[in-house]
């Protein structure tokens, strides 16, 4: 059925006016050529389908692993982003805290203790004018020596931390307590000074009212010192220890997520490499069989052209059937490469800027 056969059959059929001029049916010789081409193409398609069973299985396995790796990487990147933000927030709090001047906790406790103990005898003397028992007098004095430093402590903390409406109320209450106590003690001190010979004790000539004002100023100064000490002892963030713990936790989490992300990227790269190799092998094999079918069809058409050329030389008319070639359909399996593995490439809203496969 080569070109010689086409030459020979074309001349022979032309002398007999085969095929007839007005018929659309192709000549028996062309039908035989078409049948041979169909059989060859069918065999090529069957060989491809048999070979692709294994190739497609490997391709789908590699594609599945690649998509799973991408999902894992996107998940790790989201978690890494959250960990990075948590770390940045915790680091910001830690750095902000370190920029503020601080008074050591030990020094603060010693100062508050010294203020409370130093205030005790002065306040106890004032309560003597109430005529209560000595023990009760010292109890009253002790209560005030605790209340005032405590009030100063909370005022310092409130001023140091971020101010809000709730803390504003507490601040006002503490301030009113201090002012109320200060006024009450001032009043009792004035009465004490009026009732006692304090000028001889102090060795100064001073009006009781002036002396009272002096002690008020001293008391206010001591309270201010205590409040200032509280301010510099505490951190602007009320839960500094928790914040520092959060920083350590965020740091460990970030390190873990960074490691997991690197591992996920390595998995994606490996999966992409395997998928690329499997895809290239499968596409190359498909192109080989597709080329075979196209070549078979092209050879059939060239052979028919030889047949028709010599057929027309032996006749004076042109058959209608010569306007087209016998139909040879390419099997579906060789028309386009089937890449459907029944997988979804939805990467949960993420994307991977990686290799194009």
Image (cartoon, grey):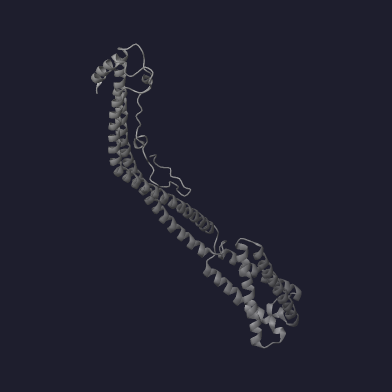
Q: Specify the farthest residue to the top.
A: 316
| In this picture, residue 19 sits left or right of residue 4 | right
Image vertical order of residue 51 relative to residue 163, above or below? above
Front-most of 201 and 56? 56
Question: How many numbered marks appear?
Answer: 0
Q: Is residue 107 visible?
A: yes
Quarter of the image where the C terminus is located = top left
Q: Residue at 32% of width from left, 12% of height from top? A: 315
Image vertical order of residue 57 relative to residue 236, above or below? above
Q: Is residue 207 visible?
A: no
Front-most of 97 and 41? 41
The percent coordinates of residue 76 (x first, y second) are: 43, 52
Quarter of the image where one finds residue 118:
bottom right
Quarter of the image where the N terminus is located = top left
Image vertical order of residue 224 relative to residue 12, above or below? below
Quarter of the image where one finds residue 214:
bottom right
Image vertical order of residue 329 relative to residue 224, above or below? above
Q: Residue at 37% of width from left, 48% of height from top? A: 64
The percent coordinates of residue 106 (x first, y second) are: 52, 70
Front-most of 68 and 335? 335
Quarter of the image where one finds residue 141:
bottom right
Q: Residue at 68% of width from left, 77% of height from top? A: 202
| In this picture, residue 20 sits left or right of residue 224 | left
């Amino acid at each position: 059925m080569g070109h010689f056969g086409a030459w020979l059959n074309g001349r022979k059929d032309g002398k007999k006016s085969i095929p007839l001029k007005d018929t659309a049916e192709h000549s028996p010789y062309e039908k035989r050529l078409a049948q041979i081409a169909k059989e060859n193409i069918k065999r090529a398609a069957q060989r491809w389908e048999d070979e692709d069973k294994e190739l497609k299985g490997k391709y789908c396995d590699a594609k599945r692993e690649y998509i799973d790796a991408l999902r894992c990487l996107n998940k790790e990147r989201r978690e890494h982003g959250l960990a990075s933000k948590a770390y940045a927030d915790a680091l910001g709090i830690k750095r902000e805290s370190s920029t503020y001047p601080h008074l050591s906790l030990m020094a603060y406790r010693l100062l508050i203790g010294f203020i409370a103990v130093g205030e005790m005898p002065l306040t106890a003397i004032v309560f003597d004018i109430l005529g209560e028992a000595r023990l009760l007098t010292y109890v009253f004095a002790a209560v005030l020596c605790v209340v005032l430093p405590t009030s100063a402590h909370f005022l310092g903390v409130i001023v140091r931390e971020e101010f809000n409406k709730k803390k504003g109320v507490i601040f006002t209450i503490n301030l009113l307590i201090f002012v109320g106590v200060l006024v009450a003690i001032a009043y009792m001190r004035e009465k004490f000074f009026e009732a006692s010979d304090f000028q001889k004790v102090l060795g100064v000539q001073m009006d009781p009212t002036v002396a009272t004002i002096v002690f008020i100023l001293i008391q206010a100064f001591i309270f201010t010192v205590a409040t200032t000490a509280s301010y510099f002892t505490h951190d602007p963030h009320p839960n500094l220890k928790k914040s520092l713990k959060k920083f350590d936790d965020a740091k460990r989490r970030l390190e873990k997520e960074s490691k997991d992300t690197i591992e996920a990227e390595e998995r994606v790269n490996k999966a992409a490499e395997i998928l690329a190799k499997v895809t290239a092998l499968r596409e190359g094999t498909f192109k080989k069989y597709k080329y075979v079918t196209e070549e078979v069809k092209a050879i059939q058409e060239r052979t028919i052209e030889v047949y028709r050329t010599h057929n027309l030389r032996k006749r004076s008319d042109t058959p209608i059937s010569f306007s087209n070639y016998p139909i040879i359909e390419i099997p579906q399996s060789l028309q386009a490469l089937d890449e459907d593995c029944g997988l979804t490439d939805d990467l949960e809203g993420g994307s991977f800027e990686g290799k194009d496969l």
